[in-house]
């Protein structure tokens, strides 16, 4: 396997991904990611010098509209699925001591 | 003749003529669901009461002449990644086990406006990540042609429900083949339209630049009719394209004379099951005999589509799935220490292994230091792949090939080796990268009696060529199988 994924890398990616992996899951993730990257490295065979990255297949532009409110008060609907709410707001764990 | 054997359009026709009541169609469908669902598990959620209430309303509107369209009164199933107001929408994930949307996806709204009756939400691979419907948190779906086999995925529940007459038609979504491949495995018709044709508003995003909603149906006429109904320009989806040529049913013409078909040699090489190959080439021969011009050619870059796709799709997924954090909706871990730990625990407990695998990979390829080498590289190769298709469509109206290298694998055979599973997407995935339309329709069965699918790929906005060719082929087989 060409791509050896270190514990440090997996821990770092775990922070980016906001995932807490068990020691077992970490080992599996190292293997899986290494294999996938080996596979993705195949793209290196292609010379893409001068090729623009294509994020969208059509030449789409940003869609603009006038800055006016078009919807009504949807706060009740927005909160309907909240795991925690208080006084018409999302309730989250304490963030500032 | 049983009501269940009718196509969606045939059923609606009889309803409008007063020969069948909408509630009668529902009675039949729910009786079939009662008989089959225990074994097949096509649905995550059924909405029997709501469906009957909706049926009464639709019947009134049909009787009063308000609803006259070709889908009025037809019972539909919707893939569980499309939001439905007041109906549980799980994406087949634990993290959305309690999510009841407060709005309805635009494509579903369009169907409802046409008088369709939504009966339930179909099972899928978790967040549409998979090709077997085995990664669902709510159990596997089984293939109606042989319950020891998978229905394909990720829209496996929708495809199986259509094949088992547990609905008359269904909506699915296709990010890398998720409509076409299960359609192929279950012996039904499935179509992914040109990117931007159907609004993605209310479709829970996986790979936003690749996702498209499309129909799974009993025949090509239903497919064209439903696509015509759900296609719309929507200001709520900034990638939605205004099109004037969405009258797809006008292409239901049995004539392929002079149409140019390209068969990519690189789709018929190593790894393709000989029985699939034989059936697909026989289909090409049928079209040739009907007057189409058939030629082999080299598409090129085929083996680069999968690594390109998994880089881009994983990157977009890692970003799209950041919203599942236990605050606004869905599952929240019960015990945690502080905000960040709550995020992490919620997500780790809420997502399954395949979803975590793709989020990890996506986070990695987007991370500083690797972004250029992986993510941008994939976007550059995507440009090359698009160019290869552009060159092919300068010569051909339609590209013809298999949908998948094999027929449906057995349950439990695919998940152990992710890369092997990903290789099964080889013929479908480039279509999404290039934003093209593609249709899958039945073209035979293998020795085990499992359906084989024929794939037709068109240039952007050329759905009508696909529909015309698919319809012509279906006609020469004596209608639907």
Image: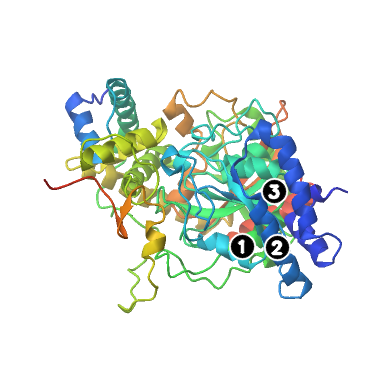
Label annotation for residue A24:
none
Which residue in the protein does label 2 denote?
Answer: B71
Quadrant assignment for the C terminus of chain B = top right
Picture residue at 33% right of the left edge, 55% below the top:
A55
Marks 2 and 3 sit apart, C-alpha to C-alpha, by 13 Å
Q: Are marks 1 and 3 on the same chain?
A: yes
Picture residue at 56% right of the left edge, 60% below the top:
B108
Q: Is residue B170 left or right of residue B287?
A: left
> In the rendering, at what x and y percent does residue B231 appear?
56, 64
> In the rendering, at what x and y percent does residue B259 appear?
65, 58
Q: Work out whether mark 1 precedes mark 2 in sequence or the reverse, and give the earlier one.
A: 2
Chain on which label 2 sits: B
Label annotation for residue B167:
3
> In the rendering, at what x and y percent does residue B305 appear?
42, 41
Picture residue at 52% right of the left edge, 31% below the top:
B134
Marks 1 and 3 sit apart, C-alpha to C-alpha, by 14 Å
Could one spot residue A43 in this view of the protein? no
Mark 1, other Cα within 10 Å: few <14 / some 14–19 / many ≥20: many
Q: Is residue B82 left or right of residue B295?
A: left
Q: Is residue B309 left or right of residue B40?
A: left
Chain on which label 1 sits: B
Secondary structure category for the residue under label 1: helix
Contact flag, marks 1 and 3 (Cβ < 8 Å)? no
- Look at the image and name its color scheme: rainbow
Q: Is residue B252 left or right of residue B17?
A: left
Secondary structure category for the residue under label 2: loop
Secondary structure category for the residue under label 3: loop
Label annotation for residue B111:
1
Which of B139/A26 is in front?
B139
Contact flag, marks 1 and 2 (Cβ < 8 Å)? yes
> In the rendering, at what x and y percent does residue B282 appear?
71, 39
């Amino acid at each position: 396997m060409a791509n050896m994924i270190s514990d440090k890398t997996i821990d770092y990616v775990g922070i980016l991904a906001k995932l807490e992996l068990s020691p077992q899951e970490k080992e599996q993730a190292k293997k899986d990611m290494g294999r996938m990257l080996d596979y993705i490295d195949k793209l290196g065979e292609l010379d893409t010098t001068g090729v623009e990255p294509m994020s969208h297949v059509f030449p789409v532009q940003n869609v603009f509209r006038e800055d006016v409110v078009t919807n009504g008060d949807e706060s009740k609907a927005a909160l309907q699925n909240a795991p925690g709410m208080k006084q018409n707001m999302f309730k989250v764990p304490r963030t500032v001591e | 003749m049983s009501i269940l054997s009718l196509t969606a359009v045939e059923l609606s026709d009889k309803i409008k003529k007063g020969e069948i009541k909408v509630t009668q169609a529902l009675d039949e469908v729910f009786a079939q669901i009662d008989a089959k669902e225990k074994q097949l598990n096509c649905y995550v959620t059924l909405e029997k009461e709501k469906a009957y209430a909706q049926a009464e309303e639709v019947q009134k509107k049909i009787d009063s002449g308000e609803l006259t369209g070709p889908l009025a009164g037809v019972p539909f199933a919707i893939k569980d990644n499309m939001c439905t107001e007041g109906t549980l929408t799980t994406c087949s994930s634990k993290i959305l086990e309690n999510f009841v949307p407060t709005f309805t996806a635009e494509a579903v709204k369009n169907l409802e406006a046409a008088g369709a009756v939504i009966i339930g939400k179909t099972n899928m691979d978790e967040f549409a990540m998979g090709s077997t419907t085995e990664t669902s948190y709510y159990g596997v779906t089984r293939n109606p042609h042989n319950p020891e086999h998978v229905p394909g995925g990720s829209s496996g529940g929708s495809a199986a429900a259509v094949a088992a007459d547990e609905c008359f038609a269904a909506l699915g979504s296709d990010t890398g083949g998720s409509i076409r491949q299960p359609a192929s495995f279950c012996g039904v018709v499935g179509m992914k339209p040109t990117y931007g044709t159907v609004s993605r508003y209310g479709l829970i995003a996986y790979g936003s630049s690749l996702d498209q909603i499309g129909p799974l149906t009993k025949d090509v006429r239903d497919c064209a009719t439903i696509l015509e109904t759900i296609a719309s320009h929507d200001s709520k989806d900034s990638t939605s394209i205004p099109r004037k040529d969405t009258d797809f049913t006008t292409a239901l013409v049995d004539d392929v004379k002079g149409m140019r078909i390209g068969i990519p040699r690189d789709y018929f090489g190593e790894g393709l099951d000989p029985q699939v190959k034989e059936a697909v080439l026989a289909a090409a021969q049928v079209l040739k005999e009907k007057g189409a011009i058939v030629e082999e050619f080299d598409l090129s870059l085929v083996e680069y589509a999968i690594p390109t796709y998994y880089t881009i799709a994983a990157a977009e997924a890692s970003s799209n799935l950041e919203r599942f954090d236990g605050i606004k909706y869905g599952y929240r871990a019960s015990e945690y220490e502080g905000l960040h730990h709550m995020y992490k625990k919620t997500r780790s407990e809420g997502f399954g292994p395949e979803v975590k695998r793709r989020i990890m990979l996506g986070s990695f390829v987007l991370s500083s230091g690797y972004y250029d080498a992986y993510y941008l590289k994939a976007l550059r190769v995507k440009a090359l792949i698009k160019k290869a298709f552009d060159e092919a469509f300068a010569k051909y109206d339609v590209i013809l090939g298999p949908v998948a290298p094999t027929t449906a694998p057995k349950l439990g055979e695919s998940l152990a080796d992710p890369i092997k599973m990903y290789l099964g997407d080889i013929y479908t995935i480039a279509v999404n990268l290039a934003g093209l339309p593609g249709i899958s329709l039945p073209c035979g069965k293998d020795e085990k009696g499992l359906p084989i699918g024929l794939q037709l790929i068109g240039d952007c906005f050329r759905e009508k060529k696909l529909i015309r060719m698919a319809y012509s082929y279906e006609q020469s087989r004596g209608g639907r199988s």
